[in-house]
Image (spheres, helix red, strand yellow):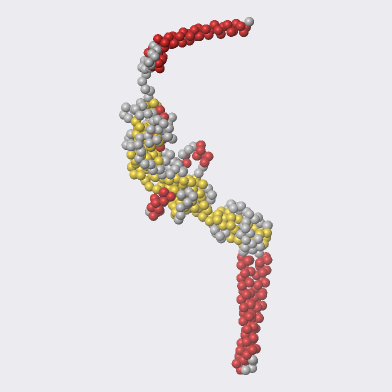
Amino acid sequence: MGNGSATTRRSGRQWPVRVVLLVAALGAGGVIASSYDPADPMGSITSAVESPLKSLTSLFPSGTAKGGGPRGPQAAPVRVATAGVRDVPVVVRTIGTVLANSVVNIKSQIDGPLLTANFKEGQMVRKGDLLFQIDPAPFEATVRQSEAQMARDQAQLASAQADAERAVMLSDRGIVSTQQRDQLVANAKALQATVEADKAALDRAQLNLGYTKIYSPIDGKTSAYIVYPGNQVRANDAAGLITITEIQPVKITFNLPQVNLPKLQDRMRENALIAAVTVRNDISEAANPGAAEEGDGIPVKVDFIGNAIDARTGTIELRATFSNPDLRFVPGELINVGVRLETLQQAVNVPHEAVNVGQAGSFVFVISADNKAEMRPVTVVYEDPAVAVLGSGLKAGERVVIDGQLRLSPGTPVSILGNTSEAPSAEAPTSRDIQTTARPQTAPATAQRGGGEGPAARGG
């Protein structure tokens, strides 16, 4: 019973709808049949269908709003900035690496037990500081032995020289034969050579004794111990005893595109090639983009330009020497490097967000006096993430849209949100790896940044 009642109720609700649809279909068929023209069958059907649609459309005028009044185009909310004029530095930025000025692996030149190490791991040492002491006892004994042997040979030499002198004198008198004289003279010369060999052996023994004390050859910072006191050391062991790294000063190496080489060489000849360096902090930069670029960095003079272009990357190496007084930079560390190539004098500039790229090139949306958007093609001669320098297409003082471009097309009325801002200061570094960008003059753009269709632009 329950299912039968539900079916009856559903059928009761649906039958009026079915009746209306049936009547509409019969009416449409009647209209088509009455207006059917055998000479133009398709035209007859089209006219029959359009006639009732026009009647329905006349009941709802398209120019009225929900409340019954006319509705005009809505103003698009945007944020704007004013184009300014200032000196803009052209800066190329990249990532550099800190290099040690020199690295020395300290090795022993003799075999023996290592007695003491006169420094702590990681300590700064000066040139000439005593680092290690190897047991000197065996080498002191060798020195004494060499001294005794040389003294013995010197005594024998003195006796042989006296015999040779007497033999020469007696030979002149005919008392000693020439053969005896020559033998005694040769014996004296042989002993002279033996004494010279003894002197060399003594020098070698004293040199080895000196090797028992190992001194620092440079100023620098020591590594961890590779061999600890109490161990036996070997001469010229590949691992060595410690490593000393000179970190005052340090070298900063970085690469720049070869297209910048002429300007780099010009600045080098003028003795004005300076690199501004800052310490990288990827975690804080990810949390607060742009924070690392607020300052100009530490100025470091570039003193080396490579003699060849890297064929794999198309870049050339540059190096700068930094005194590193507070040991801020450590060899192997990655740092931000910015090099100023030139300064654009009194250049018209706008915030980077104002420039859009379409199919025909770069353009900006300019706000007219009656608060309507105008699409204006521009030529960008230099840009970084904060500022764009324009070569043509815009005058100082004109207002440009920096947010909300997606809602705009030429002639669209706008509603300005907030206060009009000035273009950002071009002196502040804003990026670590942006390069100078030169763009050819282009026609008005017709697509948003990225190459979409229509006049829509980047923004929100």
Question: In the image, what residue occupies the spot 51% across and 49% down?
Answer: 97
Query: Disc count in the image?
Result: 0
Choose between 149 and 414: the one closer to the eye: 414
Q: Is residue 188 above or below residue 453?
A: below
Q: Position of residue 206 (x, y in %)?
A: 62, 68
Quadrant where the image shows the C terminus = top left
Furthest residue toward bottom: 174
> What residue appears at the point 66 percent right and 64 percent down from the top-left corner?
136
Asked if residue 397 lies left or right of residue 112, the reply is left
Q: Is residue 308 above or below residue 82?
A: below
Q: Quadrant of the N terminus?
A: top right
Q: Position of residue 288 (x, y in %)?
A: 49, 37
Q: Vertically, is 333 above or below 68?
A: below
Does residue 200 appear left or right of residue 451 in this picture?
right
Residues 132 and 246: in front is 246
Q: Nearer the viewer, residue 405 or 399?
A: 405
Residue 27 drawn at (x, y percent): 44, 9
**Foreground: 221 or 50?**
50
Q: Is residue 251 among the parts visible in the rendering? A: yes
Q: Is residue 310 left or right of residue 192?
A: left
Q: Quadrant of residue 53?
A: top left
- Report the residue at 38% width, 36% height from top: 360
Q: Position of residue 299 (x, y in %)?
A: 44, 49
Residue 278 visible within the image: no
Q: Residue shown at 49%/50% (left/top)? A: 312
